[in-house]
Image: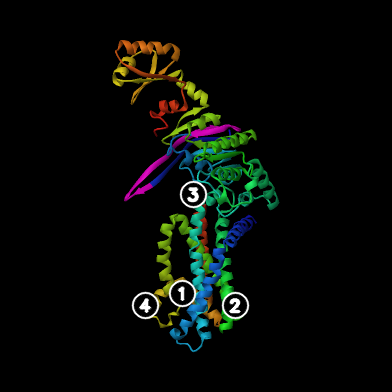
Amino acid sequence: MKILRDTWLVFSRQILLLLRNPVWVVVGVLQPLLYLLLFAPLLKPALGVRTNAEAYQVFVPGLLVMLAIFGALFSGFGLIAEMRAGVIERSRVTPVSRLALMLGRSLRDVVTLLVQGIMITLIALPFGLSVELQNVLVAYLMLALIAMLCSAVSAAVALKVRSEDALAPLLQTVSQPILLTAGILLPLAFAPQWLKNVAKWNPFSWAVDGVRDLFNGHPGTDHVWQGLTIVGLLTVLTVVWAAREFAKSVR
Amino acid sequence: MMIETHGLKKSFRSRQGRETKTVEAVRGVDLAVAPGEIFGFLGPNGAGKTTTLRMLATLITPDGGSAVVAGADLRRDPGEVRRRIGYVAQGGSTWDESSGREELILHARMYGVSKAEAKRRAAAVLDAFQLSEYADRKCKTYSGGQRRRVDIALGIIHQPKIVFLDEPTTGLDPQSRAHMWDEVRRLRDESMTVFLTTHYLEEADALCDRIAIMDHGQVVAEGTPDSLKQEISGDVVNIGLTDVARGAEVLGSAEFVRKLETMDDGLRLYVDEAGSAIPLILRSLDSGGVGIGTIELHRPSLDDVFLTKTGRTLRES
């Protein structure tokens, strides 16, 4: 299959370049650890739970979703740098699959996120986090879809605006309300009704609910399948959008 | 024909404040490029050279017209065009953190060849472009000339029938430029067709087998550099004068002057043959009482061709 081969080609190049840059590797590993070690202890009193273990049970799923959103959402900056270097244009004159140009880069973001996610889960275990393997695997699927979705959005927007100066404020403006109304760091249980109503329109709030249920050992709840469906559909739509942006002729 | 276009058109909409303006970048270009030639697109910046090139390389879709590139129809089958052509952009195409060899292998593989074959081809072009020594260093360590050679190597690694080079020597020092000319000639000797753009007159003159002069989105002249210069026919005489207006008056109606242009400090005269014209010019000016500063004769250059076709020199546009 040409598309699979081409995707692998783009993906392996991206991973190679990522691993070659020690700064990214160190940041990618350290950043989630800091969140886990420094932020979680604050949550115990804030959430009104009795043990650290309970706090981690609420916080870790949120942290994972946040990483999935943010890590991938800012990948467009790398794409703009590649555009500036002429690497994208060079690819576009070859018969390489346009979808592969997009998928290969997004899969890099998915794999990066999964590596971070697995590390966080493993480190949180000794602190009292408990989760069953089959549930955590479904949760990782949800996270992978979120990363793919955000990476595709970021790529499509980057290809449209074509400048870091425009991309940075745009992504900030969009990501802040998404983060706040998704109940990512704190659950929306204590939120006023109007905020809960707003959250219903935030796809990531459904995803967070799903991931929390999975971590709490309830894979059969509505939250799980609803979250997967919503995020899955959006992922397909945004991937198509981004692939079209890649294919589209731009000046 | 390696390239044949009819009425190729492209306009862009640009927005300035609230007004949208349509800029006709390319206004009906007809071209015929034969296999195995170095074809040059000469024109000032903004003439539409790059836009035409990008259309032929499938990077932007034409608004109108048709083109057959390397035997494939540009509008119906851009995928096939991509397989048969190479394209080297003006601004470079390498990534700082990869090595030249890595870039070449990846690029070859994007054309569908196996890893082993891609490695073999990369080694071969690195050798041909005298880059083997630096092949495994990161691209950010390369000089401008080395980097440009990697760009060209990338453009031809899949052995295309035709390669498009957008201003291949812009920004290079004279030595690297001469080196690049040799590389381009070598490609032609390997029976590749080369289509390049340039705004350097000397480059079009020395390197290209045939050129098309482009201005304001249209081809204003086409032919070999020599035939274009002959079209102007005869010689060019530049005379420095103290009183330009008076000189123009005296010589304007003289039958031995085919064409006369006024410059800041004198006149430019197009004559059939300078040897017999100069005494006549001197005599006329003398009897008209016009003081002569300098007199200088030269064979017409491509700039004169450009001037007669567009009414201004390439250097000033």
Query: What's the CA distance linking mark 4 and mark 1?
Result: 14 Å
Q: Which residue is mark 1?
A: A205
Q: Which residue is mark 2?
A: A122
Asked if residue B21 is among those painted magenta in the image, a careful observer would answer yes
Q: Main secondary structure of the magenta part?
A: strand
Q: Nearer the viewer, mark 3 or mark 2?
A: 2
Q: Which residue is mark 4?
A: A194
Say the numbered circle drawn on residue A249.
Answer: 3
Q: Chain of mark 2?
A: A
Q: Residue B272, image x and y in percent?
A: 44, 15
Q: Residues within 10 Å of mark 1 (few under 14, many from 20)?
A: many
- Say which quarter of the image contains residue B9: top left
Query: What's the CA distance linking mark 3 and mark 4?
Result: 43 Å
Asked if both marks, 1 and 2, belong to the same chain, the answer given is yes
Q: Residue A134, image x and y in percent?
A: 62, 78
Magenta segment range? Answer: B14-41
N-terminal-most mark, 4 or 2:
2
Asked if marks 3 and 1 touch (Cβ < 8 Å), the reply is no
